[in-house]
Image (spheres, rainbow, N blue to C red):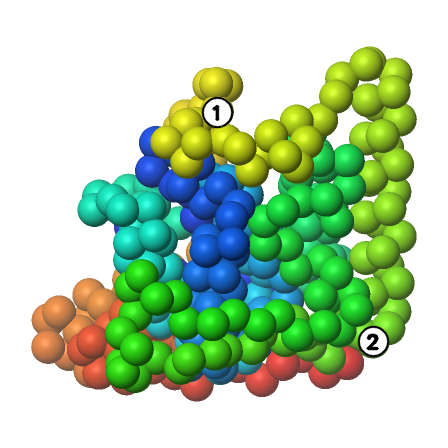
Amino acid sequence: MLPREVLPGSFYMITRRCTQRLFLLRPDAETNNAFVYCLAEAAQRFNIDVILPSVMSNHHHTVVFDRHGNINEFVEHFHKMFAKCQNAIRGRWENLFASEPGSKITLTRPSDVLAKIVYAATNPVKDFLVDTVAHWPGVNGLYPLLDDRTMLACRPTKFFRDNGPMPAEVSLRLVIPPELGDPDEIRCILRERVDKIERHFSARRARTGRRVLGRQRVLRQSWRDSPSSVEPRRNLRPRVAARNTWARVEALRRNDEFVAAYRTARAAWLLGLPAVFPAGTYWLRRFANVRVAPPAPPPPC
């Protein structure tokens, strides 16, 4: 696997799918509470700004801002704790998530972050599950984000000990980092874009006669079921997302430069020669204590 640059001050969209596409995250009170609890606890532990989570029945999308370069520890801890907790809720022992690595896409510009927020939030509408985002019975952070409302969760009793170190209650306040723009303007943009998508799919259903599955039928689905559609295989696994072509080219160029510098430093390090790894080196810095160059200063405005 290619080395991956991890720099403070980065936006990401995290995606993780359930094993065999099973509906292991099908909405219900225990599942919704467990997801918010594990997400909030991990975010507080590793100082991650959660912008928007969106949990479908067999996968989740979560958009975050990593101010301190802790994204890998955050993702590892969150997925580990939630998988164990959710398995206890479902009464199962095998892996909850698919064996393939989860997706962690770096979002290069504010416009890309907004696009992924809207994409994740409107997933239930675009998949013809419900009419509007508000009707989705699972965890969806759109309205807590738009209304600046805190999400609360209590410690799941089926996995965590009453006298253990995990907090009895946690709160999750979804934030719009100043690096993304003015919060009021961002909320206005998100409302308009989500409303546009909801109206588009409403008109599409009226034109074609297609109906949504509906909230109640979603809740009645068995978590042992999976979609009847055929899953695409061997697709590309992007590491960056940029709607602007030149921004995407620049991000890929920087990634190529990082990989080349990393390989040069690693070759010297393996020979016992002095080596300074490029800024953003994660694994060897954490586990082998190698020297890493400081991050470059941001370009002048």
Q: Residues within 10 Å of mark 1 (few under 14, many from 20)?
A: few
Q: Residue furthest top?
A: 208
Query: Percent position (x, y) of residue 238?
Result: 50, 45
Q: Write the residue at 22% across / 83% down.
A: 289
| Residue depicted at 85% across the width and 30% down the height | 202
Residue at (20% x, 76% y) in the render:
287
Q: Nearer the viewer, residue 1 or 134?
A: 134
Q: Are the residues at dot 2 and dot 1 in contact (C-beta closer than 8 Å)?
A: no
| Disc 2 secondary structure class | loop
**Mark 2: amino acid:** Asp
From this view, report whether residue 104 is shown above or below residue 70: above
Give above or below for 175 relative to 126: below
- Residue at horizontal 89%, vertical 26%? 203
> In what element is the residue under mark 1?
loop
Question: 18 or 34, which lies in front?
Answer: 34
Mark number displayed over residue 155 = none
Q: Is residue 10 visible?
A: no
**Residue assigned mark 1:** 227
- Indicate the position of residue 295 as horizontal and vertical percent values: 48, 82
> Residue 219: which quarter of the image?
top right
Q: Which residue is mark 2?
A: 182
Q: Sequence-wise, which precedes: disc 2 or disc 1?
A: 2
- Give the alpha-carbon distance from disc 2 to disc 1, as whole Å: 40 Å
What is the x, y in percent for residue 173?
63, 75
Which quadrant holds residue 212? top right
Check disc 2: other Cα within 10 Å, few if <14, some if 14-19, many if 20+: few
Please identify, in this view, whether the residue under mark 2 or under mark 1 is nearer the observer: 1
